[in-house]
């Protein structure tokens, strides 16, 4: 395997777009695939806005911003990822959809490419198994939102991941200015195994009338130095995503203590998913 020069990203949403932006800024030739033109247009607009802000804040020159933009290409055909040394999947957090994609990638890409998944909770080994003979090139590369700001990449080996793949994935994360921290392949890894019970407990505290939502958040921000309270963070992640991650952990770790609080599920069933629907625990109408 040669060194990584070209990064492929599957999914131009919030996570994929952020990963692509950081890869482009870090000097990698970057190819972003999305099947929806609308997602690509939205992603490009966000890149433009964030690059303009970086120039305005004198974190980079206009020339550097233009060069970063130039390095990021958008495609709507999966075959166009053939020249990437690594493909980072950042699509919907759904096991069936991800395994179908990895089975497809294993047949169409070259046997030199690393297949990374940005899953937040699904077993890397399960995703890798779908890739058949390519299972040894599958690895978890878990970024955090907003990707340009958050320093962590959780790196998770599947049962079959070969050491060279891990080494090159860590090197890529570091070249993207991130700190790569290893975790084992258990549902939710470390990040969500610790984060989600805190978020869930905040919902229980609200449901049981321990405090109002804004006060729960204030207590955690001012008392624990968290940049956002757990309820606002849940809105930021997406309440449906939180419930999904907790379900994956309850099943995968075979323990009902990870199951989502009835109140968060109620908000989800009312369509209050957080920032993305402008209403979750809090309102974001403005
Ligand atoms: N992309 C790029 N930069 C962004 C950004 C984005 N989407 N959102 C904010 N920023 C930048 C801003 O440009 C600003 O930098 P600048 O002023 O120097 O340009 C800086 O971040 C701070 O932003 P703001 O002043 O607008 O707001 P805050 O100071 O409140 O910070 C925050 C916003 C960075 C989101 C902060 O509240 C925070 O760190 N929150 C916690 C986020 C967190 O915990 N993320 C992890 C979620 S869990 C996850 O992703 C895993 C998954 O598996 C669930």
Image (spheres, rainbow, N blue to C red):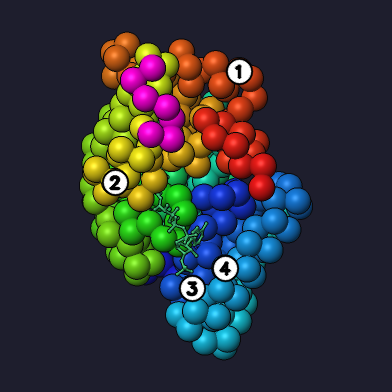
Q: CA distance from mark 3 to mark 2?
A: 34 Å
Q: Residue at x 65, y 58 (%)?
A: 43
* Part of the protein shown in magenta: 209-215
Q: Quadrant of residue 223?
A: top left
Tell me, yes or no, whether the two marked residues, 1 and 4, touch with CB atoms within 8 Å. no
Answer few, some or many: residues within 10 Å of disc 2's Cα (few below 14, many 20 plus, some between 14 and 19): few
List the single residue furthest toward the right.
37
Q: CA distance from mark 1 to mark 2?
A: 31 Å
Q: CA distance from mark 1 to mark 3?
A: 39 Å
Q: Residue at x 41, y 60 (%)?
A: 149
Tell me if residue 110 comes above or below residue 238 in the rendering. Answer: below
Instruction: Give the mark nearer the N terminus: 4 vs 3.
Output: 3
Residue pointed to by mark 1: 269
| Residue 144 picture location, percent across and down | 41, 49
Residue pointed to by mark 3: 25
Instruction: Give the mark nearer the N terminus: 1 vs 2.
Output: 2
Q: CA distance from mark 1 to mark 4?
A: 33 Å
Residue 222's tag is 2
Side (left or right) of 143 relative to 284: left
Residue pointed to by mark 4: 50
Side (left or right) of 4 relative to 185: right
Instruction: Give the mark nearer the N terminus: 3 vs 2.
Output: 3
Instruction: Give the mark nearer the N terminus: 2 vs 4.
Output: 4
Answer few, some or many: residues within 10 Å of disc 1's Cα (few below 14, many 20 plus, some between 14 and 19): few
Q: Quadrant of residue 206?
A: top left
């Amino acid at each position: 395997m040669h060194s990584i020069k070209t990064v492929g990203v599957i999914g131009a949403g919030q996570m994929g777009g952020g990963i692509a932006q950081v890869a482009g800024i870090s000097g990698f030739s970057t190819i972003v695939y999305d099947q929806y033109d609308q997602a690509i247009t939205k992603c490009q607009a966000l890149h433009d806005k964030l690059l303009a802000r970086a120039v305005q804040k004198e974190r980079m020159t206009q020339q550097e911003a233009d060069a970063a933009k130039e390095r990021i290409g958008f495609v709507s055909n999966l075959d166009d990822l053939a020249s990437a040394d690594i493909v980072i999947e950042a699509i919907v957090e759904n096991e069936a959809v991800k395994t179908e994609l990895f089975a497809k990638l294993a047949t169409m890409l070259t046997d030199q490419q690393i297949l990374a998944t940005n899953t937040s909770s699904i077993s890397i080994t399960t995703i890798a198994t779908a890739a058949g003979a390519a299972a040894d090139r599958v690895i978890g590369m878990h970024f955090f939102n907003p990707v340009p700001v958050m320093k962590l990449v959780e790196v998770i080996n599947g049962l079959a991941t070969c050491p060279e793949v891990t080494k090159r994935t860590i090197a890529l994360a570091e070249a993207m200015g991130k700190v790569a921290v290893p975790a084992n392949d258990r549902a939710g890894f470390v990040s969500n195994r610790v984060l989600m019970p805190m978020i869930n407990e905040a919902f229980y505290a609200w449901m049981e009338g321990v405090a109002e939502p804004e006060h729960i958040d204030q207590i955690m921000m001012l008392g624990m130095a968290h940049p956002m309270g757990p309820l606002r963070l849940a809105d930021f992640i997406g309440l449906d995503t939180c419930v999904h991650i907790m379900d994956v952990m309850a099943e995968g770790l075979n323990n009902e203590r990870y199951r989502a609080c009835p109140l968060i599920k109620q908000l989800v069933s009312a369509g209050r998913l957080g920032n993305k629907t402008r209403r979750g625990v809090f309102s974001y109408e403005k």
